[in-house]
Amino acid sequence: MSAPGALSWYEAGARQRIAVLLDQSSFAEILGPAERRMSPHLPLFGLPRAFDDGIVVGRGRLDGRPVLVAAQEGRFMGGAFGEVHGAKLVGLLRLGLTERPAALLILFDTGGVRLQEANAGETAIAEAMRAIADLRAAGVPVIGLVGGRAGAYGGGGLVAGTCSGLAVSEAGRISVSGPEVIETNRGAEEFDARDRALVWRTMGGKHRYLIGGADAFAEDTPESFRKAALGLIDAAAPFDLATLEAEQARLERRLDRFGETLDGRDVWARLGVNDPEGIPAATDDAFRASAEGCRESARDAR
Amino acid sequence: MTLAEIFSSLFPEGHSVTVEDGLVGGHGPLGAKRLHVVGLDGNTALGVDGAIRLAAKVLAVIREAPGAPILVAVDSDSQRMSRRDELLGLNEYLAHLAKALLLADRLGHPTVGLLYGHSAAGAFIATALATRVLAALPGAHPSVMDLPSVARVTKLPLDTLREMAKSTPVFAPGLDNMVATGAVHAVLDPAAPLGPQIEALIAALPEGDIRDRLGAERGGRPVAQAIAARIAGG
Amino acid sequence: MDRLSFRHATRRPHPGTRAEAIAGVVASGNLEILLERVLAPDLCTVEIETPVTGYGDVWEAVVADFVARAQPGGLRISINDGGARPDTVSLRLLQGARLMEEAP
């Protein structure tokens, strides 16, 4: 493997991401592939299974601090939540309650619920959100990292919205309904899913960072996500009434400020970003500089 | 049952619950207590505007009526599917509503879901599925996706899926399947007064999240509980 | 869904001490390979689960070729196939065998 900094987070697989994110050789997987806890349902659909059902969970260290980590594999079934996949995340979150690590990290890479196991996937998402609330209330930050090819869509977007803090890269997308789903249900006039530029400025990482939908903007490297995660652990807000009232005010304010806009560029112009037209093409550094001072922050309000 | 029928059974002495833009809010007497109601009526899709208003109602209950029970009554569409909703960050609004309900639960408010019509996907997760115990009335029809859409995505013939749905509750729409996976704890009797049935649910609130245990017992999720328990045990 | 299973005698134990490795991913045209050092050193087994039916002969040939070249004695190899071409299968098998020679 090449030097950690050279690896693309977007291109990497779940195991690779964990290996380069955490302290070297610190990761110990729980219920690994040799346990063969595979989907009991996919064969009914004539579909191949994966030994880990598309999610890797375990313990490790981040800058010396003990963490629990879950990483979704976006290349297997779009990283979607099936019964086993969901149960592994839920189990890890519950383990967090007894182990009280410095943080629990979720490396999102998911299209949402796996349709072949839809009821199990949907219920697991609800269980995961409840477990995140419990863990945050116990003082353990739950940090989400979004920079994979499948993004954080569907129920994955809701799980992400439950985390204490989120880091996103330009290529990361966070959304509930995906472009294809909107187009299928509402037509191409509502959302042209083939218009990739539209996809990025509606649900992409830069837009999410600008409106406060994510708390840190990472480059597409493990080193950058690692730095972002460490910062978010220290900045995590408690799960209490004050935080949710601040989030209520923050989200109401967003509707007041941008509720009438229909395009990311208009949102960015209202935010006061210099050269909103140039945002999609801006380098990570130039983008961060433009965002500084005008982006909406979700600090203590997520 | 319609929402009006539900409330006449639940609150025979009257109530203050209203429906505005498909959003349900208000309260009525339940035994010696006051039951607060939030929810969605009339197959309403849940978008950013509705979610933030419902969350405001939940946070107001937390502030003003410590410990009071909250009923989340749901007959909804899925999340509202639009460019505007996603542009504004629908995932945050839906998660915020779910978090408000989860916080209420943590702060001692019994939270009970009541599914009396349709619900699906993000709207379902943000409302009924964020309660401690979820009850349904016969005729409720939750789904993640309808079978014709599942057929499109999986490229399997609809007839094959219909046949599979009979023996495999894990993917098929419908109340029975959501009961089998453990997402719905109990189905209520519409012929009996609802007040005592809701009171009984509150009196017997499960400790923590037992949905995976129910899914194992009922066969709708054969492996989830064992796997979660294995990992949670380290 | 086809389930195939092959069993080969090998001349030597596979080098290295690593107990387990996984290579590849189950995706269209790809596959994942799990290798476990759990068998007698003169034995190698390969189990395959694939949604593409009717290619038992091709699998048999690819596996036999790999065993002859790598002599992976002691390895239990399990494959989840997503519809990979034979050259991809060979590549992943050799990649997996190499991983088992690396430090654990």
Image (spheres, grey):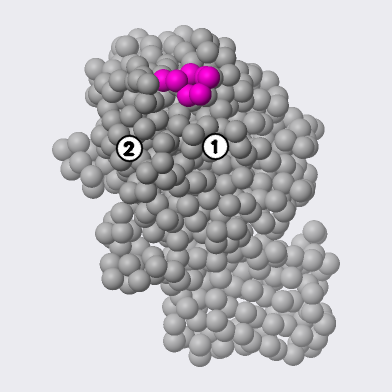
Residue placed most toward the observer, B34 or A15: B34
Q: Amino acid at mark 2?
A: Asp
Chain-order first, disc 2 or disc 1:
2
**Residue C84 in the image: above or below residue A296:** below
Question: Where in the figure is residue A63, as x and y percent of width and height?
Answer: 75, 31
Residue A74 visible: no
Residue B206 visible: yes
Residue placed most toward the observer, C100 or A134: A134
Under circle 1, the secondary element is helix
Q: Amino acid at mark 1?
A: Leu
Residue at which label 1 appears? B201
Question: Where in the figure is residue C7, as x and y percent of width and height?
Answer: 68, 88
Q: Main secondary structure of the magenta part?
A: strand
Mark 2, mark 1: which one is toward the viewer?
1
> In which quarter of the view is residue B177 placed?
bottom left
The residue located at (72%, 42%) in the rendering is A95
Horizontal arrangement in the rendering, residue B191 relative to residue C56 (left or right): left
Question: Where in the figure is residue B161, as x and y percent of width and height?
Answer: 34, 67
Q: CA distance from mark 2 to mark 1?
A: 20 Å
Marker disc for residue A248: none
The number of callouts visible is 2
Say which chain tag 2 marks: B
> In which quarter of the view is residue C93 placed?
bottom right
**Residue span colored magenta:** B28-34
Residue at which label 2 appears? B75
Horizontal arrangement in the rendering, residue B144 relative to residue A59 (left or right): left
